[in-house]
């Protein structure tokens, strides 16, 4: 059994990665239904939170049905991070996760996200202070290092563990790599193989098939897989991995009916949560994947991503079902 603090998880849990503008409550709920064992919010700026920026505080909403859920925050200022912990606690998450991995310039230039990989002492002291400031488990998501020449992830992980970090998820790329090349899981396995490590070590990066998840478990010996892009518009990825682990065979792809049903519920939950305009707008990015592979779908895809009101999108989904209901996905 794998444990994050007191939270008991099945063997080799599957975690939905934090993803900006993707890992919102409706999407997390769908992933949870399809087998994600832990879900994370997208990253939330600690500076935004303490200024009560509406955009940041809305990201704190969580549904009961998605638990256990981690709220992820980022920042590099101790005071702001501690105040954010207090704000985040009020939403009642199960976990608070610190983003020490975001590679984008506007974040790293402030020393936050992956920027902190240049100052490991600060990374450790921030984590320690946050652990002491809350009873919730503090977890960390990070990258291998700033660049190839400065990978010290084994030492970093051990130090984070020693100050009370409850689990660590490691994306097998450096900041310098951004999203290029292939994720390298070998340094993550080194972290896991360190005999002093006892907290869960989760692997992340490029898990896009059940076979790869199995490789991460069996060849690299990691404690669980954090899954990002493979789940976008495809929450069924989690159950497909689990089915493969249990049976060694591939589960049938979701039917058209299931896809339509997921798209409808996704849209409805988004509209209920964010309101009509934003709900319609922000669900658009998922449709291409929900219906990937259907021939001659272009016209419908176009209408799904340009129709401005939810009633109109529901209508298009009905038409999709009428026209393609018998389509067999392989
Ligand atoms: C659209 C998008 C948004 C992301 N936003 C975040 C984020 O808010 N916090 C974070 O820690 N990582 C974020 N990431 C990185 C992912 O969590 C993950 O580390 C990365 O995509 C590699 O995993 P994958 O190959 O399974 O996608 C984001 C990635 C994508 C594609």
Image (spheres, rainbow, N blue to C red):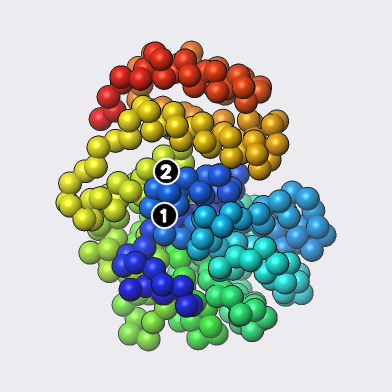
On the question of residue 43 being in view, the answer is yes
Which of 192 and 182 lies nearest the eye of the viewer?
Answer: 192
Which of 2 and 151 lies nearest the eye of the viewer?
Answer: 2
Tally of marks: 2
Which residue occupies 34% across, 66% down?
Answer: 10
Q: Mark 1 or mark 2, which has the lower sequence index?
A: 1
Give percent across and percent down for residue 277. Answer: 70, 30
Say few, some or many: other residues with alpha carbon within 10 Å of mark 2 (under 14 / 14 to 19 / 20 or more): many
Q: Secondary structure at mark 1?
A: loop
Give percent across and percent down for residue 152. Answer: 46, 74
The image quadrant of residue 291 is top left
Which residue occupies 67% across, 81% down?
Answer: 133
Q: Secondary structure at mark 2?
A: loop
Quarter of the image for the C terminus: give it.
top left
* Residue marked by disc 1: 36
Marks 1 and 2: CB-CB under 8 Å? yes
246 vs 274: above or below: below
Task: Report, in whole angstroms, how far the alpha carbon at label 1 lies from the one at label 2.
Answer: 9 Å
Which residue occupies 79% across, 63% down?
Answer: 50
* Residue marked by disc 2: 235
Which of 320 and 300 lies nearest the eye of the viewer?
Answer: 320
**In the displayed structure image, the side of residue 254 where residue 102 appears, left or right:** right
281 vs 308: above or below: below
């Amino acid at each position: 059994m794998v444990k994050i603090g007191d939270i008991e998880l099945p063997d080799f849990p599957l975690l939905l990665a934090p993803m900006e503008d993707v890992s919102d409550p409706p999407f997390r709920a769908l992933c949870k239904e399809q087998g994600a064992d832990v879900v994370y919010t997208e990253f939330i700026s600690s500076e935004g939170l303490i200024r009560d920026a509406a955009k940041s505080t809305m990201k704190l909403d969580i549904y009961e049905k998605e638990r256990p859920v981690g709220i992820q925050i980022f920042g590099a200022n101790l005071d702001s991070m501690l105040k954010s912990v207090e704000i985040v606690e009020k939403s009642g998450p199960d976990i608070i996760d610190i983003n020490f991995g975001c590679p984008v310039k506007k974040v790293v230039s402030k020393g936050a996200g992956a920027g902190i990989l240049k100052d490991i002492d600060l990374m450790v002291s921030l984590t320690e202070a946050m652990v002491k400031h809350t009873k919730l488990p503090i977890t960390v998501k990070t990258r291998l290092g700033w660049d190839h020449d400065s990978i010290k992830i084994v030492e970093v992980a051990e130090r984070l563990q020693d100050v009370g970090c409850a689990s660590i998820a490691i994306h097998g790329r450096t900041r310098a790599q951004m999203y290029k090349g292939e994720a390298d899981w070998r340094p993550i396995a080194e972290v896991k193989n360190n005999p002093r490590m006892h907290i869960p070590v989760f692997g992340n990066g490029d898990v896009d098939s059940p076979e790869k998840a199995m490789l991460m478990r069996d060849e690299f010996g990691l404690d669980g897989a954090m899954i990002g892009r493979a789940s976008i518009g495809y929450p069924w990825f989690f159950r497909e991995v689990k089915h493969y682990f249990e049976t060694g065979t591939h589960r049938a792809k979701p039917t058209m009916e299931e896809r339509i049903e997921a798209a409808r519920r996704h849209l409805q939950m988004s509209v209920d949560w964010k309101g009509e305009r934003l709900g319609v707008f922000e669900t658009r990015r998922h449709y291409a994947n929900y219906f990937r592979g259907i021939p001659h779908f272009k016209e419908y895809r176009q209408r799904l991503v340009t129709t401005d009101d939810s009633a109109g999108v529901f209508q298009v989904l009905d038409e999709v079902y009428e026209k393609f209901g018998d389509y067999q996905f392989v």
